[in-house]
Image (tube, coloured by chain):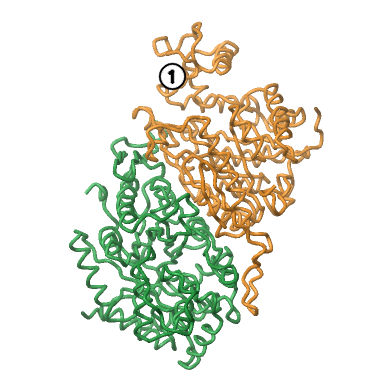
Chain colours: A green, B orange
C-alpha cells in the first residue's frame, strides 16, 4: 500500500513523560495553567497542527503517598472547561476533549460539545472513552467499575443518543423572523424520544445544531469491544502502536471493520508518538537519557502496578516480572506491558522506568530523521498522522514547530496554511448530511 | 435601616422579555451567539458590572408547537461551556453559571467550577439550583422529578461535597520542586472520603484549589427549603421581589436565617429587575409598550390564564378584565395581576401582553429615575444590588452603560474601576480561610 502525496494529520497533547516536568527549562505547572495551555494551542496553530488533544481521568491519580508527591499530573484542568477558553484565543486548531461515557449523561455532554462546536466555529472533537479506573468509580458512588462489556454497551447507546441529540435541529431551523414572529420552523425540529436499556432521553437539545453537524468523534479502544465501537462510531482512531508492522495490520483491520459496519468513509488512524528532537541524533538521544533519569523509581513501580492492574510492590524490583493474573485494567494495555517485559527480558524496575517514562512509539533524532519516520508510516499505510507528545513543555513544542514543521512542510507532508473552516474540513472528513442519525 | 454610602452590586443576564427578540435593532439570536455574548460580557465590564449571570434549564422549553415556534429562548449555549470562553476575552467581570444539583454529579461539577475559577483568575460563580421541571426529568431517564424535599436534601449534601472537594488542596500545596523531584506537599492534600445518603465521593479533586478558595455561591430558592439552604450555603441571593416592602421583609428574614445558621457574613441580596431606559419617561414608556406589542397574542393569553388560575380565552380580549373567581393559583400573584389591570385600566389583551412580556420588578424611565429607584432600594435595606435584564440586546445594554452607569457612578453607587482581583473581592465577600469546609 503506497500513499505518496498524502498529507499527515498532526495532533498534539501535553507531555506525558514522567520526568518531563523536571527537565531544564520545563514549566512544571504547564498543564494546570491556562496561560501556558493558551500559549500551547497558539503555538500548535502556528505550526499548522490539525488539533490539540486533551486526555482526561475523573480522579486524581492514586498511589502510595510517597510516590504520589513525585508525580506531575495529579492536577490539570477539566478538558471541556479549558477547551472553550482555548477556542476564544485561537482560530483554526481543532479542540479534542476526552469525556467518559461511563460517568456522564448524554444530554449534558451533547450540549457541552455542541456548545463548544458553536463557540469555536466548528472545531470541537470528542474523544469517547469508557472509565476503567477504580479511582474514578470511588468519586461517583460506585464500589466497583462496571465490567468491560457493560461499559461498552453503555458507550454504544450513549453515542446513539448523542447523534440523535445533535440532530435535534436542522442547520436552517432558525428563521428568527422578527416581522412574522416565527422563531423557528417546526418541521426542522426533531424530538429524539429515545428509550433504551441505559438511557431514556426525550430531547430536543436546547443548543443549535453543531457547526460540523457532528463534532469529530475520536476513539481509542484497543480491545475487541473497543475496536468494534470505534469502527461503528468514530472518525479518528487514536492508538498506541509501537511498531510499523503491527500498526499496518491494525490500520487495515480497522478500515475493514468500518466498511463491514457500513461506514462510508475511511477512518483516520493516528498513533501516539513521543518526539525528542535534537540538532544531531546524539543530542536527541542525550535528551531522552536525561529525561528518563529524572523519573522517580517509586513512581515508576506504582505506574507499573496500575498498568498491570496488579500490585507489584511485593516483588523484587530487580527480578523478572512474574505471571500477572487477569484484572479489571484495560486488557490490551496490560498485555502490551507484559509483552514488552518478555520481549526485552526487562527486570521489574527497568520495565517500570520505561513504562513510567514513556514506553510507546518514539521518534528521537533530527528534524530529517523524525520527518523520515513519519513519512514512512504514512506512506506504508501504518498511520494517517500522529498525536505528538513533546519531550518537555514549553521547549519541546517550540523546537518542533521551529525545526520539524518546516521540514514536513518542505516535503509536502504538512499544510502551509489551514485550508478549511472547520476541524472536519481540515481533517478531510465529510460533514454528515441532514438526518444522518436517523439512517 | 439606612445604608447611605453603600455601593450597588450590579449583575446582568440576557433579555427575558418575550417580545425583546423582535424589537427594532435587536439580534434575535443573541443568546445563542458566542460573538454577541462576548460583546455583552465586555460591555458589562466597561460598565463596571460585578458579574454576568447565566440562567439555565436542562431541556428545551415545552409548549404546544404553535406557541413554541414563537418563543425566543429554546436554544442557548451551555453556561459552563460559554463562561470559560468569556473568561478568555474579559479581565474583571464575575462569571456566574447556573448548574443543577439534581442532574449533576458533584465531582464533575466541582472540577468544572474549580477549572473556571483558575482559568478566569478567580471570577467563577455558581448559581445552585434544583431541577423542578418535568421536561428536564425526561432528558435524564426519570419518569418524574424528585419531590421537593428530596431535591433539597440532595442539594444540601451536594454542596457539602463541593466544598470538601474544593478544599482538596491548600493554596500552597504545589511546590513543584524540579531539583528534589517533589511535586506537592502531602500534608497539604486533603482526601474528602465522603459517604452520605446521596453521594459517596472519595476525592481529592484533580484540579488545584480555586483561586477564590470557593467560587461564589448564588442561590434563588424561594420556598421554605430553598430559603434555608440559601441561608446555610449561599453568599449571594438572587430573588424575584416585586415591591419594596416585601423585599425589605425578605432581606431581613434572610439575614436572620443566615445568622441563625452560624454564617459569619451578611448575604448579598440581589433582586431581578427589568430595566427600560428612555431619554424621557414618555419615551421609556413608549419603548415598553412597543415591546409588549411584540409579544405573541396566543402565548400572552395562555400566560395570563395561568397567572389567574382561570381560563380567560372565552372573554373579549379587547374588553376589560371581568371579576375573576378564587382559584388554585398563587394568591398573591393573582391579586397583583388583578391590581395591575384595575390600576392602569388595561384590556385583557394589554394585561396579557404585559404579564407575558415581563411581570416582575421593573424600572422604566430616565437614567435619573432608574438610579433613584435603585438607590432607594439599596438605602432602605430592600436590596444590595440588582440582576438586570435589559429591554433588548444589544441595544439595551449599550444604552444602560452609556446613560445609567455614569449616573450611578456620579452618585457613588457604582465603582469607577474594579478594585479587587477576584469576583469575591469586588463583591466585598471574604475569601474562606483554609479548612473552612472542615469546620
- Residue appearing at x 42%, y 71% in the figure: A307
The answer to whether residue A180 is visible is: no
- How dense is the environment of label 1, judged by Cα within 10 Å: few (below 14), some, or many (20 and up)? many
**Residue A165 location (% of width, % of height):** 34, 45
**Residue A289 location (% of width, % of height):** 51, 87
The relative height of residue A304 versus residue B38 in the rendered view (above or below) is: below
The chain holding disc 1 is B
- Residue appearing at x 26%, y 77% in the figure: A248
The relative height of residue A290 versus residue B107 in the rendered view (above or below) is: below
The answer to whether residue A318 is visible is: yes
**Residue A348 location (% of width, % of height):** 45, 81
The relative height of residue B403 versus residue A253 in the rendered view (above or below) is: above
Q: Is B268 left or right of B35, judged from the image as shown?
A: right
**Quarter of image, res B74:** top left
Q: Secondary structure at mark 1?
A: helix
**Residue A218 location (% of width, % of height):** 35, 62
Q: Is A439 left or right of A193, judged from the image as shown?
A: left
Q: Is B380 left or right of B27, judged from the image as shown?
A: right
**Quarter of image, res B268:** top right
For label 1, the residue is B301
- Residue appearing at x 35%, y 81% in the figure: A374
Marks counted in the figure total: 1
In the foreground, B431 or B309: B431
Check the picture and name the quadrant holding the N terminus of chain B: top right
In the foreground, B414 or B78: B78
Amino acid at each position: 500500500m503506497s500513499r505518496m502525496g498524502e498529507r499527515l494529520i498532526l495532533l498534539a497533547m501535553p507531555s506525558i513523560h514522567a520526568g518531563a516536568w523536571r527537565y531544564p527549562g520545563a514549566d512544571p505547572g504547564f498543564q494546570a495553567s491556562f496561560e501556558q495551555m493558551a500559549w500551547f494551542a497558539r503555538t500548535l496553530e502556528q505550526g499548522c497542527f490539525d488539533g490539540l488533544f486533551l486526555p482526561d481521568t475523573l480522579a486524581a491519580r492514586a498511589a502510595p503517598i510517597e510516590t504520589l508527591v513525585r508525580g506531575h499530573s495529579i492536577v490539570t484542568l477539566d478538558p471541556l472547561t479549558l477547551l472553550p477558553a482555548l477556542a476564544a484565543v485561537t482560530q483554526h486548531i481543532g479542540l479534542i476533549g476526552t469525556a467518559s461515557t461511563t460517568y456522564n449523561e448524554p444530554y449534558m455532554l451533547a450540549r457541552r460539545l455542541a456548545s463548544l462546536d458553536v463557540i469555536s466555529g466548528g472545531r470541537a472533537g470528542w474523544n469517547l472513552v469508557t472509565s476503567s479506573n477504580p479511582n474514578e468509580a470511588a468519586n461517583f458512588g460506585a464500589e466497583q467499575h462496571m465490567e468491560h462489556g457493560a461499559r461498552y454497551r453503555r458507550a454504544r447507546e450513549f453515542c446513539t443518543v448523542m447523534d440523535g441529540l445533535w440532530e435535534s435541529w436542522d442547520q436552517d431551523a432558525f428563521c428568527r423572523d422578527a416581522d412574522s414572529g416565527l422563531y423557528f420552523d417546526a418541521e426542522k425540529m426533531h424530538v429524539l424520544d429515545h428509550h433504551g436499556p441505559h438511557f431514556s432521553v426525550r430531547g430536543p437539545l436546547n443548543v443549535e445544531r453543531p457547526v460540523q453537524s457532528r463534532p469529530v468523534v475520536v476513539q481509542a479502544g484497543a480491545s475487541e469491544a473497543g475496536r468494534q465501537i470505534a469502527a461503528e462510531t468514530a472518525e479518528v482512531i487514536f492508538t498506541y502502536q509501537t511498531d510499523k508492522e503491527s500498526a499496518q495490520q491494525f490500520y487495515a483491520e480497522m478500515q475493514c471493520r468500518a466498511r463491514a459496519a457500513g461506514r462510508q468513509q475511511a477512518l483516520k488512524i493516528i498513533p501516539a508518538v513521543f518526539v525528542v528532537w535534537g540538532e544531531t541524533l546524539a543530542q536527541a538521544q542525550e535528551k531522552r537519557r536525561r529525561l528518563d533519569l529524572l523519573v522517580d523509581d517509586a513512581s515508576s513501580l506504582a505506574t507499573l502496578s496500575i498498568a498491570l492492574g496488579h500490585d507489584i510492590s511485593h516483588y523484587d524490583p530487580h527480578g523478572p516480572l512474574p505471571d500477572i493474573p487477569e484484572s479489571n485494567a484495560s486488557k490490551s494495555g496490560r498485555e502490551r506491558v507484559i509483552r514488552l517485559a518478555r520481549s526485552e527480558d526487562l527486570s521489574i524496575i527497568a520495565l517500570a522506568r520505561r513504562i513510567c517514562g514513556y514506553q510507546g512509539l518514539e521518534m528521537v533524532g533530527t528534524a530529517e530523521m523524525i520527518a523520515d519516520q513519519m513519512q514512512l508510516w504514512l506512506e506504508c499505510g501504518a498511520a494517517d498522522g500522529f498525536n505528538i507528545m513533546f519531550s518537555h513543555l514549553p521547549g519541546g513544542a517550540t523546537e518542533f514547530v521551529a525545526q520539524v514543521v518546516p521540514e514536513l512542510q518542505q516535503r509536502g507532508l504538512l499544510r502551509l496554511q489551514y485550508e478549511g473552516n472547520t476541524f472536519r474540513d481540515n481533517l478531510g472528513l465529510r460533514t454528515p448530511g441532514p438526518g444522518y442519525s436517523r439512517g
